[in-house]
Image: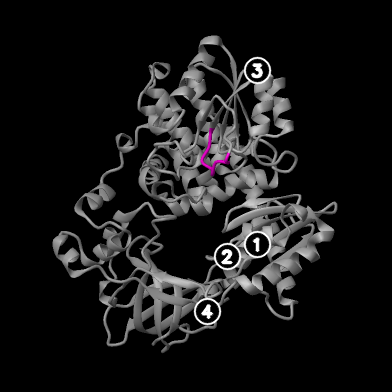
Amino acid sequence: MVNMQWKLASPAPEEFLRIHGDYPPQLLHLIWNRGLRDARAIAEFFADPDFTRLPDPFLFTDMDTAVARLSRARERGEHVVVFGDYDADGACGATILTELLEALGVDVSSYLPDRFTEGYGLTAISVKEILRRKTALVITVDCGVSDGEEIAALTARGVDTIVLDHHIVPEQLPKAVAVVDAHRNDDRYPFDWLCGAGVAFVFADAVRRRPLGQGLSEHILFRFADLAAVATIADLVPLEGPNRILVALGLRVLRDAPRLGLRKLMKIARVDAGRADTDTVAFELAPRINAASRMDHANTAFALLAANDEEEAETLAKTLDRHNRARQKKMQEMLVQAEQEVADLERVPEVILVAQEGWSRALVFGVAARLTDRYHRPVFAFALQDGVARGSARSVPGFDLVAAMRAAGGNELFQEFGGHAMAAGATLRAPWLPLLRERLQAYGRTHVTETMMQPVLEIDLELQPHEVSSELLVWFERLAPFGKGNPRPRLFIRDLTTLEARRFGRGEGRYALRFSPLHGGRVISATATKRVVGDGVGVRAGDRIDIVGELRPDWKHRGVELSLLGMRAAT
């Protein structure tokens, strides 16, 4: 583990604290550094979530056209196929659209491709199956914007396509009936970062506002809110603007009246539904939903999300849980092998490349992400099968993976490659891997800097020990829902003395700690992983340390504790 540099955010100006004195100063420091600088922005951020606060769905280019084409499909009794991606976002989006069309009385079927035999998006295989179903209209969700060739093939056979996507658009848009994507240059929707299911949700809202949706009440939006929230959190899009509203309302539904499949999934994960939050989705629900396509087929996840039968839902939830445990086991095996591969090197290079026979190509992204987190440098991880290397890459800020792959040979070396600066994928013939490793490492020596390899622990606020309280947590929780773009506050407390540290949990992999301020006062409770504890500083009674952590309820929900992100000898 690379030592982290601790970086404390600047405090809010005194004038800002004075003007907004109705809020505690600790909260004001946080909202200042999250860009909320005036009364209107603050009021909007803290306003109760409500669907009426979402932007007009018809600000999306082609939204009117999409709704009109669906209306025509219903009038003509045409068969419509909802085509979704195989991940949690795609499965949730496909469920929203399928249930919407069923509520409208449209003849509809769903199609989620096989990750291993078909791959991402529309393909020749899916085009053939769509035609076999005598389809007149396809609605894609969480994919489609880059599938111009396949959409053209469908059009040539008399099948129209509506694209509901959130990915970056290519220079040439597909010639679909409608392309609804906020990344279009001519789009007026005021927020670019909905996930695929979020776009499907907005489409449902648009349908509800037109004659096609006559008879659909606002209740249908609540019916889809938990799906939109799960997808938004799972897809790691920023929890800002409309996403903040969707997730807040969706979590409310998840806590109070979740759909049957999600209720069964929370039960199997031993989650208290009444306390469901973004962590519940990110660490319990999303991994199980995603495990379907990574270990078998996304249809299992879709069937669970759409389930209406108690017994069927319970069986499907158990299946996803079993897939997730198998995924965890396989991932751990792959990580051990990858770590050994790095350990066998004379030195850790600026760009790491690992590859093994027997790895799952659906899980190499996790290997790349874990190694990037550990070594804080770009990592490429490849699964080798039948002479082909299929891989995933993760980067650190400042290093562009796509530029690196172009420099390493681009289309002359890779069968396929793409993505963006921080996350990418690639396929090439396995015999070319040594050459790829050589070229990437040469590129890394000139493009990966010491600064890039120095991880930074961003800290929001310094607290005095006596400020740690349940009352402060209540104020901080007003910032929720937490996630990408709106993380839990990271709090710095200096000069504490360790009173006690004991290990607990599976394999004793966690620590429960108690600290005392240097000059006495309220004892602070905390938990930490073995990784945070690192070299053991702070776990011996009498150690003087500084800590960084997130304030959370303790496990009994009777008080508060800090979930530690960093520990170091007191400075």
Other residues around mark 2 within 10 Å, as few (<14) / some (14–19) / many (≥20): many
Other residues around mark 3 within 10 Å, as few (<14) / some (14–19) / many (≥20): few
Ranked by sequence position, the earlier of labels 3 and 1 is 3
Question: Marks 4 and 1, how far apart in space?
Answer: 26 Å
Other residues around mark 4 within 10 Å, as few (<14) / some (14–19) / many (≥20): some
Q: Which circle marks residue 404 in the picture?
A: 1
Disc 2 target residue:
399
Assess whether mark 2 and mark 3 are in contact (beta carbons under 8 angstroms).
no
Question: Marks 4 and 2, how far apart in space?
Answer: 20 Å
Residue at the image point whose x is 52% and y is 75% from the top: 451
Stretch of the chain drawn in magenta: 164-171
| Amino acid type indicated by mark 3 | Gly
Residue 166 lies within the magenta run? yes
Q: Nearer the viewer, residue 128 or 569?
A: 128
Ranked by sequence position, the earlier of labels 1 and 2 is 2
Disc 4 target residue:
3
Where on the picture, by quarter, is residue 399?
bottom right
Question: Marks 3 and 2, how far apart in space?
Answer: 45 Å
Q: Which circle marks residue 158 in the picture?
A: 3
| Amino acid type indicated by mark 1 | Ala
Ranked by sequence position, the earlier of labels 3 and 2 is 3
Q: Please state the horizontal and vertical placement of residue 58, each as a whole percent of the image.
A: 39, 29
| Amino acid type indicated by mark 4 | Asn
